[in-house]
Image (cartoon, rainbow, N blue to C red):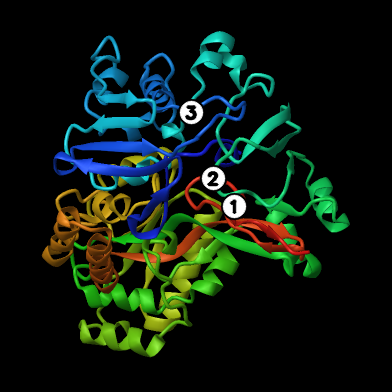
């Protein structure tokens, strides 16, 4: 609900593109070391009071307060002085370089240029907060009687654990929503939730776990089931530092041989979508081309790498932690690769603590199960943070001068389009080299009534984007 109750300074889109929200405009200063953001005229809280730049500055400093311990406060660390204050190395927030120059201008100074910083501003940890209510009401500031917010909706009732009701915020100056009231039920009973949908009492029902499996097994419900990508991926990291995994053709062969649709249907209990690329479309803005396994292409690549029909290919291990899902994946991968390529990949199951230690220092491994969910919607959080050679964040031991060069070009790009183009080139190298093998995109699943003409979620938070929801007459 945070996405509906609060509006951020900007909204983040694919390829690092940001669009105005509360901030009508901004200037990038001092070579990317500072930003000046101008709030739109007439921005207000839901009680009609003016929303000011200081509401953002105070909120950010509060979220950095070590005594508050706000989740995701590390996303604020690029701000000069932020990390020192959050970690208790500075006694006060005076050194945190964010300030309201006037009522509508917010100035931020960073410790160093940080690509993707603007996209971070869409995250809830950067939302404005109502200082008077927080200081006056303490933990009760989120009570509907006290809560001041600046989003499209205002909270009018909250029965904790049961549900909430929100009404349209008449003081909201952004894109209007197509309804006056939203009722959200937190019903825990699976049958009750599905019954509410069947009866038409609920327009949309999010389903996961047993509910999701029940919806997939029911013909009528399956017809109304829609999956939405959640800016996260499951993939297999290959040890590119040793043979045969050092050969890109081997890695690509194993990827081409997979029937991802069958894997998704056979392995996963939770909502996922077949992944045809390592980076989700919500980040790159481009859908990878789906298709059946290319067995001919896979066999040709493997033969070209010196292993025709799998001959001479050394036995390999797939490492994962103890879990029904990952065990099913291990068995399905082993079967598909043996049938398609004639190679042997055996399961290597570890207890959770052992697996965590393994991912920090995997040693002489072959393949292991990995995943990533974006923290903020910008390519830097995928391409730079995961795959830059000098970081080797996933211990893939993959080195690509071409890929790293495109990252440098992206950092130096003077325009949004030039930056996006550099990341597209980096993506092409990543997919061609395949240091990891994509399996599935994380997803959210909803049952939607036929009268819901359009429905959209925020891929990072998973919250429903009410501005993208349309009801047919």
Query: Between 162 and 17, which is closer to the camera in this rendering?
Result: 17
Crowding at dot 2, Cα within 10 Å, few <14 / some 14-19 / many 20+, comes out as some
Tell me the quarter of the image containing the N terminus.
top right
Q: Is residue 239 above or below residue 74?
A: below
Q: Residue furthest right?
A: 199
Residue at (57%, 38%) from the top-left corner? 151
* x and y, in percent, of residue 364 in the image: 23, 55
Mark 1 surroundings: few (<14), some (14-19) or many (≥20) residues within 10 A: some
**Closer to viewer: mark 1 or mark 2:** 2
Q: Which residue is mark 3?
A: 51
Query: x, y (%) of residue 353?
Result: 40, 38
Do tag 3 and tag 2 residues touch (Cβ < 8 Å)?
no
Mark 1 near mark 3, Cβ–Cβ under 8 Å? Answer: no
The secondary structure type at the circle numbered 1 is helix
Residue bearing mark 1: 467
Q: Which residue is mark 2?
A: 174
**240 relative to 17 in the view: left or right:** left
Quarter location, residue 125: top left
Mark found first going from the N terminus, 3 or 2 = 3
N-terminal of the pair, mark 1 or mark 3, is 3
CA neighbours of label 3 inside 10 A, class few (<14), some (14 to 19), many (20+):
many
Badge 2 marks a residue whose secondary structure is loop
Q: Label 1 vs label 3: CA separation?
A: 21 Å
Quadrant containing the C terminus in the rendered view: bottom right
Mark 1 or mark 2: which comes first in sequence? 2
Left or right position of 88 against 39: left
Please tell me whether mark 1 or mark 3 is closer to you in this view: 3
Numbered-mark total: 3
Q: Could you say which quadrant of the image residue 396 lies in?
A: bottom left
């Amino acid at each position: 609900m945070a996405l509906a109750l609060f509006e951020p300074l900007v909204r983040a889109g694919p390829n690092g593109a940001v669009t105005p929200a509360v901030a009508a405009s901004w200037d990038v200063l001092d070579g990317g070391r500072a930003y000046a953001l101008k709030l739109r005229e007439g921005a207000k809280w839901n009680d009609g009071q003016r929303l000011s730049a200081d509401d953002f500055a105070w909120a950010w400093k509060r979220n950095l307060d070590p005594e508050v311990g706000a989740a995701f406060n590390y996303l604020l660390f690029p701000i000069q002085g932020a990390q020192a204050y959050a970690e208790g190395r500075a006694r006060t927030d005076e050194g945190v370089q964010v300030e309201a120059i006037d009522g509508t201008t917010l100035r931020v100074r960073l410790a160093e240029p940080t690509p993707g910083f603007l996209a971070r501003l869409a995250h809830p940890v950067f939302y404005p907060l109502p200082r008077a209510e927080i200081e006056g009401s303490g933990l009760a500031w989120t009570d509907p009687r006290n809560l001041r917010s600046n989003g499209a909706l205002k909270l009018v009732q909250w029965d904790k654990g049961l549900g909430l009701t929100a009404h349209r915020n008449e003081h909201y100056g952004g894109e209007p929503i197509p309804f006056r009231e939203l009722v959200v039920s937190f019903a825990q009973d699976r049958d009750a939730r599905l019954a509410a949908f069947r009866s038409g009492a609920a327009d949309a029902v999010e389903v996961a776990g047993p509910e999701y499996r029940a919806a997939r097994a029911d013909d009528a419900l399956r017809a109304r089931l829609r999956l939405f990508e959640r800016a996260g991926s499951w993939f297999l990291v290959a040890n590119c530092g040793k043979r045969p995994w050092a050969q890109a053709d081997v890695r690509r062969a194993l990827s081409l041989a997979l029937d991802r649709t069958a894997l998704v249907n056979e392995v996963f209990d939770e909502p996922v979508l077949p992944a045809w690329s390592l980076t989700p479309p919500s980040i790159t803005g481009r859908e990878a081309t789906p298709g059946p396994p290319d067995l001919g292409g896979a066999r040709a690549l493997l033969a070209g790498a010196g292993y025709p029909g799998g001959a001479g290919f050394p036995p390999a291990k797939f490492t994962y932690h103890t879990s029904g899902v990952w065990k099913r994946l291990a068995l399905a991968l082993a079967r598909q690769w043996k049938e398609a390529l004639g190679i042997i990949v055996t399961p290597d199951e570890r207890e959770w603590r052992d697996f965590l230690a393994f991912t920090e220092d995997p040693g002489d491994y072959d393949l292991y199960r990995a995943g990533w969910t974006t923290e903020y919607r910008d390519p830097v959080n995928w391409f730079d943070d995961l795959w830059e050679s000098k970081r080797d964040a996933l211990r893939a031991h993959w080195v690509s001068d071409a890929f790293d060069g495109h990252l440098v070009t992206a950092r130096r790009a003077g325009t949004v389009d030039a930056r996006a183009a550099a990341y597209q080139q980096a993506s092409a190298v990543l997919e061609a080299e395949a240091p990891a093998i994509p399996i599935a995109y994380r997803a959210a699943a909803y049952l939607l009534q036929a009268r819901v003409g359009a429905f959209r979620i925020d891929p990072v938070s998973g919250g429903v984007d009410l501005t993208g929801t349309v009801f047919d007459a």
